[in-house]
Image (tube, grey):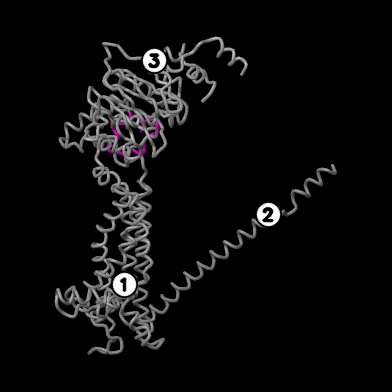
């Protein structure tokens, strides 16, 4: 009887292990809550500031999205402020889609080479080079764009050289390593036995790559491209340095134009908090934020579809 | 241990025992001469010279790491990129281990099925049509016909004939493995190599797979690596016993399992090691 009580006491006593368990949970829970608070805070702040344009300055949402004139300090003939964001929205999408279109074939080609055709050289040379490219600060890309790409564009196509084309060239190099390394991951995730099965059926290596490996990796490759697009869409500094920063509808690929991010970086220091000029910029930031949520959603959807297959 | 020592002393066993085939009804279709396999500098197979009779099942048995899978994978040059294979692999009088052999054409004649069922993430139909399409067969009727006969030969037709367009990944393990066999025989190979095809399957599926193999014998020469000695005894005509990178004994299956000539074989088949 006595020994039973003793055993119970021993078992119910909080051991060191049990205390450590609680401590561990507390630490990870705190970290999680902090991150959630930061994310919610950012979204809430950007949303409240971004919506102010429409609530306190009474700008029509449709005018904002479809207007072609961006000049928040000035009112037009009807007494409405000129806050048409369409040139920037078009600029951002154009530059994102073009750079993704150019980068995708190169990225997948490189990934195929370093993963399928020459894994040894791929691991030794290409992998470190790709990682190095990811680490180069965007101002360096922008500076090279400014001193090399812009003059070249000017010489080849005339005009000032600033514009969507130069932006696309710079972004192409910037997103290439991201898309390449994620594509390589996607290819690496294709089980080895798919390749073996195909080779054993008499398929050549190239047939195996494009009929089996790329097919099986498609969701991963699409995710890689969307990630690259998200990066291109959100890139500010390098684009701002080569795009010309004129809030005009781009009428050609070599005419100066602007993106959501470039207008934000050039304008945010020159406005007073709470003014329409400032609020309008926050609205652009809100559009950016919503777009990055959309990109995230697309990546999620692709991932889910890939798992279901 | 005492008993074993007694047996060792009582019987005079050979060191190595490999027969030459001489069966006019089942002539030798594939043989290896002086085959050595190296992974880097490490030699994985020292002595692996065997002959295979056409339209018969030959089982390769032996403990893990004995070189039997290495040997099998060398036969249709699946080891090309990961190992160095020297020696001759004679297929109908041609050495297919020469560098100028078109391995893709050769693998059409020497097919392979792997340990783990590995259907592609495509429909059942497309899995079987895969190798045919690679070879430019596009005629729908011809494809339909070959898909049907291949599935029938692999004893899978009745279970999947209404689901040909469904994903092959939804099949059970046993069905998936028979799909892989159907996929391999769709291009009508001469020889079918199987690398432990039943090791991932339950006993019922294994039994069905064995029946399938027995019925396929009429059309194909089958070489199968197996860890399951009962399986080797049930389905094969000839058995080769591999140990530590060499073929220690090769003879008819009944000889290997009832009265092996080599002591190590005897120990292995009676379950004393391995």
**Quadrant of the image occupied by residue A285:** bottom left
| Disc 3/disc 1 C-alpha distance (Å) | 70 Å
Residue at 83% across, 43% down: A3
Q: Residues within 10 Å of mark 1 (few under 14, many from 20)?
A: some
Q: Residues within 10 Å of mark 2 (few under 14, many from 20)?
A: few
Give the side of residue A42 with respect to residue B224, left or right.
right
Q: Nearer the viewer, residue B161 or B216?
A: B216
Question: Compared to A78, does A24 lie above or below?
Answer: above
Do discs 2 and 1 share a chain?
A: yes
Q: Mark 1 highlights which residue?
A: A141
Image location (x, y in percent) of residue A183: 33, 55
Q: Which mark is residue B251?
A: 3
Question: Compared to B130, does A261 lie above or below?
Answer: below
| Disc 2/disc 1 C-alpha distance (Å) | 52 Å
Q: Which mark is residue A18?
A: 2
Do discs 3 and 1 share a chain?
A: no
Do discs 3 and 2 share a chain?
A: no
Give yes or no for residue B167 being in the magenta stretch: yes
Give the side of residue B245 with respect to residue A199, left or right.
right
Q: Chain of mark 1?
A: A
- Most distant residue in the right direction: A2
Residue at 15% across, 35% down: B139
Question: Compared to A242, does B174 lie above or below?
Answer: above
| Disc 3/disc 2 C-alpha distance (Å) | 63 Å
Q: Which residues are magenta?
A: B159-177
Image location (x, y in percent) of residue A32: 53, 64
- Most distant residue in the top direction: B10
Tell which tag, 3 or 2, sits nearer the viewer: 3
């Amino acid at each position: 009887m006595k020994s039973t009580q003793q055993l119970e006491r021993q078992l119910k006593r909080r051991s060191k292990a049990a205390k450590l368990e609680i401590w561990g949970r507390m630490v990870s829970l705190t970290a999680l809550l902090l991150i959630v608070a930061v994310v919610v805070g950012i979204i809430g702040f950007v949303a409240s500031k971004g919506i102010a344009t429409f609530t306190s300055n009474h700008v029509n949402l449709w005018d904002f999205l479809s207007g072609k004139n961006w000049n928040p300090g000035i009112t037009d003939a009807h007494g409405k402020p000129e806050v048409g964001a369409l040139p920037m929205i078009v600029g951002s999408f154009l530059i994102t889609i073009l750079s993704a279109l150019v980068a995708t074939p190169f990225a997948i080609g490189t990934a195929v080479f370093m993963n399928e055709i020459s894994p040894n050289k791929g691991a030794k040379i290409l992998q470190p080079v790709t990682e190095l490219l990811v680490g180069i600060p965007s101002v360096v890309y922008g500076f090279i764009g400014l001193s090399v790409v812009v003059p070249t564009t000017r010489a080849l196509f005339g005009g000032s050289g600033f514009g969507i084309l130069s932006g696309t060239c710079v972004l192409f190099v910037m997103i290439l390593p991201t898309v390449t390394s994620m594509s390589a991951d996607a290819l690496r995730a294709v089980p080895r036995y798919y390749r073996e099965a195909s080779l054993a059926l008499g398929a050549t290596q190239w047939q195996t790559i494009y009929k089996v490996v790329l097919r099986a990796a498609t969701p991963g490759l699409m995710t890689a491209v969307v990630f690259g697009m998200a990066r291109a869409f959100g890139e500010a500094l390098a684009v701002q340095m080569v795009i010309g920063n004129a809030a005009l509808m781009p009428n050609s690929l070599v005419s100066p134009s602007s993106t959501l991010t470039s207008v934000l970086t050039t304008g945010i220091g020159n406005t007073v908090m709470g003014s329409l000029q400032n609020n309008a910029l926050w609205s652009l930031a809100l559009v950016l934020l919503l777009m990055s949520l959309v990109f995230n959603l697309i990546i999620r959807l692709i991932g889910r579809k890939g798992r279901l297959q | 241990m005492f008993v074993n020592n007694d047996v060792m002393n009582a019987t005079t066993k050979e060191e190595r025992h490999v027969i030459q085939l001489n069966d006019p009804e089942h002539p030798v279709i594939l043989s290896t001469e002086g085959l050595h396999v190296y992974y880097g500098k490490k030699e994985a197979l020292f002595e692996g010279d065997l002959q295979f009779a056409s339209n018969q099942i030959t089982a390769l048995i032996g403990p893990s790491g004995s070189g039997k899978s290495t040997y099998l994978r060398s036969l249709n040059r699946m080891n090309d990129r990961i190992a160095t294979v020297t020696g001759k692999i004679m297929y109908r009088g041609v050495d297919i281990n020469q560098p100028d052999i078109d391995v893709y054409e050769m693998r059409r004649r020497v097919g392979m099925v792997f340990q783990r069922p590995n259907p592609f993430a495509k429909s059942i139909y497309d899995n079987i049509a895969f190798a045919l399409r690679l070879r430019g067969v596009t005629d729908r009727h011809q494809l339909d016909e070959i898909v049907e006969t291949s599935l029938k030969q692999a004893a899978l037709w009745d279970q999947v004939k209404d689901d040909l367009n469904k994903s092959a990944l939804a099949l059970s393990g046993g069905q998936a493995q028979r799909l892989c066999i159907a996929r391999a025989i769709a291009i009508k190979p001469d020889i079918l190599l199987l690398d432990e095809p039943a090791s991932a399957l339950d006993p019922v599926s294994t039994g069905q797979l064995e029946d399938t193999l027995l019925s396929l014998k009429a059309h194909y020469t089958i070489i199968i690596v197996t860890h399951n000695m009962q399986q080797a005894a049930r389905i094969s005509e000839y058995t080769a016993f591999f140990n530590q990178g060499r073929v220690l004994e090769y003879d008819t299956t009944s000889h290997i399992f009832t009265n092996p000539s080599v002591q190590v074989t005897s120990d292995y088949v009676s379950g004393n090691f391995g």
